[in-house]
Image: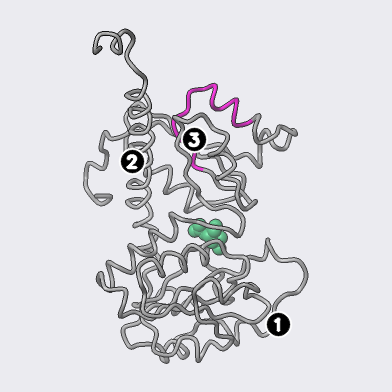
Amino acid sequence: MTAQTVKKVPLLRGKTIVNLFFEASTRTRTTFELAAKRLSADVLNINVTQSSAVKGETLLDTLRNLEAMHIDMFVVRHADSGAAHFIANNAAPHISVINAGDGRHSHPTQAMLDMFTIRRVKGPDFGRLRVAIVGDILHSRVARSQIHALNLLHTGEVRIVAPKTLIPVDAKSLGAHVFHDLHAGIRDVDVVIMLRLQRERMQGALLPSEYYELFGLTEEKLALASPDVTVMHPGPINRGVEMDSEVADGPRSVILEQVTHGIAVRMAVMSMAMRTTAGAQETEQRKEPLPGKGEAAE
Ligand code: NCD
């Protein structure tokens, strides 16, 4: 659909969507914006790091002001875990809220587009796949959502591969096998998902200085994986830190396909979310007895 000459469909015509980003983003914000435009919605981009929060306005005040402008949907990115949930709990019931990444907690649409990409490349049977997620698991909302999604899809084996300092203490309860050695971690895997070192979330030196040597993905190390291994990365890539350019731009990489799929997946999520809130509103309205109807039926 996103490659068609006429890219727009009228599903969300007349709706107003606000991209409410409290944290920097390029890919996620742009693909949400394109997705909304391709659904014919009106879109506002609000970069809160540069506006009201800086002047001391609370999150609730920002929300109330935007609600007063008759917004239909918020797409929220925030550095605090639980922020989108907080906004959903406090927004008027007719407003849909989509989480575009909250702290270290979750990034659901990223995981959905990643699953869509894996399915396109490997087919629908996740049960026969070994998938390794490599890198900064500790600070990664993407990893948490991916592990959740991979387990929902009954993936054969989910591995997380990182130095001890970048694995969360509750790693086992996430539903993945933990590896501290890249060679062992990617042996025979069908999909390798590399993650960025989230230096903005790190305090102090958490990393072994020889990170690239030990955990950076090179063609040589990739030879340990299955011969038709697929390489993924949610972006942005730190070339020469978590992976070599040869791998990132090589024939097994689907990193740019992930970006393209982000638009279609976000279009689907937005139209489904809007339909759900519209459906809930209709059900609410139907529950209200029509004036005079009760007496007439008796
Ligand atoms: C991720 C994010 O922001 O959570 N990127 C993205 O959404 N494409 C991962 C990252 O920043 O490393």
Circle 2 packing at 10 Å, graded few (<14), some (14-19), many (20+), is some
Reply above or below: 12 against 115.
above
Q: What residue type is labelled 3?
A: Val
Q: How far across and down, in percent of the image, does residue 107 sit?
A: 50, 56
Q: What residue type is labelled 1?
A: Ser
- The answer for how far apart the CA atoms under marks 3 and 1 are is 41 Å
Q: Earlier in the sequence, mark 3 or mark 2?
A: 3
Residue found at the very far right of the displayed protein: 204
Residue 209, numbered circle: 1
Quadrant containing the C terminus in the rendered view? top left
Q: Mark 3 points at which residue?
A: 18
Whether tag 2 and tag 1 are in contact, CB under 8 A, the answer is no
Q: In which quarter of the image is residue 291?
A: top left
Is residue 160 covered in magenta?
Answer: no
Q: Is mark 1 within 8 Å of ligand 1?
A: no
Which residue occupies 56% across, 38% down? 89
Is residue 67 covered in magenta?
Answer: yes
Residue 201, numbered circle: none
Q: How far across and down, in percent of the image, does residue 83 sit?
A: 60, 46
Q: Name the residue under label 2.
A: 271
The magenta span reads 62-75
* Element on which disc 1 rests: loop
Q: Which of marks 3 and 1 is nearer the N terminus?
A: 3
Q: Which of marks 3 and 2 is in front?
A: 2
Q: In this view, does 97 lie to the left or right of 267?
A: right
Circle 1 packing at 10 Å, graded few (<14), some (14-19), many (20+), is few
Q: How far across and down, in percent of the image, does residue 217 sit?
A: 50, 82
Q: Which of marks 3 and 1 is in front?
A: 3
